[in-house]
């Protein structure tokens, strides 16, 4: 297909595929729209490809020309050994995997071509080592002939209704006390479902940890202020030392992480300058133009911008739970920060909203960068570019004078490093790790835990009072986090 438009609608989905080819389908232009219900055994696009399993020396263990499409592959043969690596070839694509358990899923068994188990008996569609009798069980989402069941099965622990094996008969009894194909399917689906839930909870935990560390920033900023540094200079100290720490961590963990594509430099410039440095400068400028509480409220419009950008760029869906959590979180931030009756100029409003947009931009650009790079690479280059930009505006000569005049240089250097570690390295790494597991819009709402922590720290360390309004705001923010994590 090289042009034009094709629309295929199949209300039933069980009688035919949307597009069906026994070979390749090549689309170089035009638009294809195919809609099938998720309960059928047919596919939007159905085509076959050759699967080959080889060891790292190139010896072929099994191969099969799959006649139907699939979402996952289950392989089993006696030559597979725990601890060894193997190469799976799907058409022109290859992927090397290392077997870590006798039965396990590799890749995403629900969404990726690469998935499936390696284990006892004859659990699935791999067939025999010599390639004969290929595939009685299909993939983990298969119907016994390699054909996949479309739709979102992330919450399903049973095979789809109507599932059959081969000719429609019941699944065969396993040899030598193994498990049936159907049992193996249940195991894979249950494992994958539990793995996704645990991953989501871990992502939420990472973002809450980030918010807690960010909330402690007031302690360090106020202390550095006693040495005579202004807010921009404090930012420069923070991001520069964070860049050094991130670089050391990346050097120790994975030196190859320093290699980035030249074409991705604008992305990291956007993260470092357009997000980290921009939102910080806007926020500190807003503080000089309006009451601190108003500036904080404008900064915490960031979840709104994140949600809007997520819908625009990532196609995330707005649901009632997200919208309710967003309203609760923003209302909570307003109550915690306090509502000032003083007027705000149009310039001040623009600068304050700029801080919220820049703050939210990290979630969007970070999500894009994480598709290609590890969290350690993303945070390292983000802060390298942010640090480079900060030295243009921080008045380095004045900073040097203040550094040299510190009464206790050793303690001061230690405290600066601690500031970078607590307010930048740990929280930004945690937040970036969270972005790997949580939608950007959800992450932005959960991160509003930061002003709650800042309020608690102000009460504990600076003898600030907790008003009824602030307490209500804290409850609203915590309610938003709970609602987002309800099933």
Image (tube, rainbow, N blue to C red):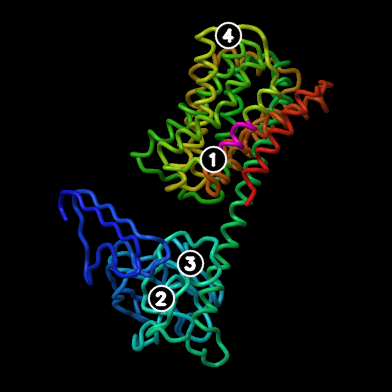
Q: Please name which of the two marks, 4 or 2, marks the residue nearer to the observer.
A: 2
- Sequence-first tag of 4 and 2: 2
Measure the C-alpha gap from mark 4 to mark 2.
64 Å
Q: Position of residue 260 (x, y in %)?
A: 40, 43
Q: Judge depth for marks 1 and 3 and give the one in front.
A: 3
Q: Quadrant of the N terminus?
A: bottom left
Give me the disc on residue 143: 2
Mark 4 is surrounded, within 10 Å at the Cα level, by few (under 14), some (14 to 19) or many (20 or more) other residues, namely: some
Q: Residue at x 60, y 36 (%)?
A: 324
Bin the neighbour count of mark 3 within 10 Å (Cα to Cα): few under 14, some 14-19, many 20 and up: many
Asked whether the beta carbons under mark 4 and mark 2 sit within 8 Å of each other, the answer is no
Label 1 sits on a secondary structure element that is helix
Which residues are drawn in magenta? 322-329
Look at discs 3 and 2 and give the one toward the viewer.
2
Spatial CA distance of label 1 from label 3 is 31 Å
Q: Quadrant of residue 223?
A: top right
């Amino acid at each position: 297909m090289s042009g034009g438009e094709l629309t295929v609608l199949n209300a039933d989905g069980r009688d035919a595929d949307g597009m069906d080819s026994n070979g390749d389908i090549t689309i170089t232009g035009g638009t294809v729209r195919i809609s099938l219900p998720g309960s059928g055994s047919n596919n939007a696009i159905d085509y076959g490809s050759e699967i080959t399993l080889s060891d790292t020396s190139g010896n072929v263990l099994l191969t099969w020309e799959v006649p139907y499409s699939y979402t996952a592959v289950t392989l089993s043969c006696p030559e597979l050994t725990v601890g060894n690596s193997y190469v799976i070839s799907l058409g022109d694509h290859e992927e090397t995997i290392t077997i870590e358990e006798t039965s396990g899923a590799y890749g995403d068994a629900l969404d990726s071509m690469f998935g499936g188990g390696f284990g006892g008996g004859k659990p699935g569609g791999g067939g025999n080592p010599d390639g004969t009798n290929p595939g009685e069980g299909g993939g983990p989402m298969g119907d016994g002939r390699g054909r996949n069941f479309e739709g979102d099965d992330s919450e399903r622990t049973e095979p789809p209704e109507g599932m059959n094996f081969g000719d429609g008969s019941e699944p065969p009894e396993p040899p030598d006390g193994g498990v049936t194909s159907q049992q193996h399917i249940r195991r894979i689906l249950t494992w994958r479902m539990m793995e996704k839930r645990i991953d989501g909870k871990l992502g939420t935990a990472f973002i809450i940890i980030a918010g807690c560390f960010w909330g402690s920033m007031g302690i360090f900023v106020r202390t550095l202020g006693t040495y005579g540094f202004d807010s921009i200079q404090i930012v420069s100290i923070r991001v520069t030392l964070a860049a050094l720490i991130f670089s050391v961590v990346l050097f120790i963990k994975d030196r190859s992480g320093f290699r980035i594509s030249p074409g991705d430099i604008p992305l990291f410039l956007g993260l470092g300058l357009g997000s980290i440095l921009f939102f910080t400068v806007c926020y500190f400028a807003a503080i000089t133009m309006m009451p601190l509480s108003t500036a904080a409220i404008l900064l915490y419009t960031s979840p709104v911008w994140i949600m809007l950008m997520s819908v625009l760029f990532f196609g995330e869906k707005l649901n009632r739970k997200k919208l309710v959590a967003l309203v609760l979180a923003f209302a909570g931030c307003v109550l915690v920060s306090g509502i000032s009756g003083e007027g705000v100029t149009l310039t001040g409003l623009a600068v304050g909203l700029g801080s919220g947009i820049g703050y939210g931009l990290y979630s969007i650009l970070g999500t894009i960068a994480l598709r290609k790079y590890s969290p350690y690479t993303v945070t390292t280059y983000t802060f390298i570019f942010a640090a480079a930009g900060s030295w243009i505006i921080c008045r380095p000569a004045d900073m040097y004078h203040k550094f040299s005049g510190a009464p206790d240089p050793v303690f001061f250097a230690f405290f600066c490093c601690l500031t970078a570690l607590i307010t930048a390295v740990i929280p930004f790494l945690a937040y970036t790790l969270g972005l790997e597991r949580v939608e950007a819009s959800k992450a932005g709402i959960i991160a509003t835990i930061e002003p709650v922590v800042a309020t608690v720290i102000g009460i504990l360390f600076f003898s600030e009072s907790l008003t009824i309004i602030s307490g209500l705001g804290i409850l609203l923010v915590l309610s938003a986090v709970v609602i987002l994590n309800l099933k």
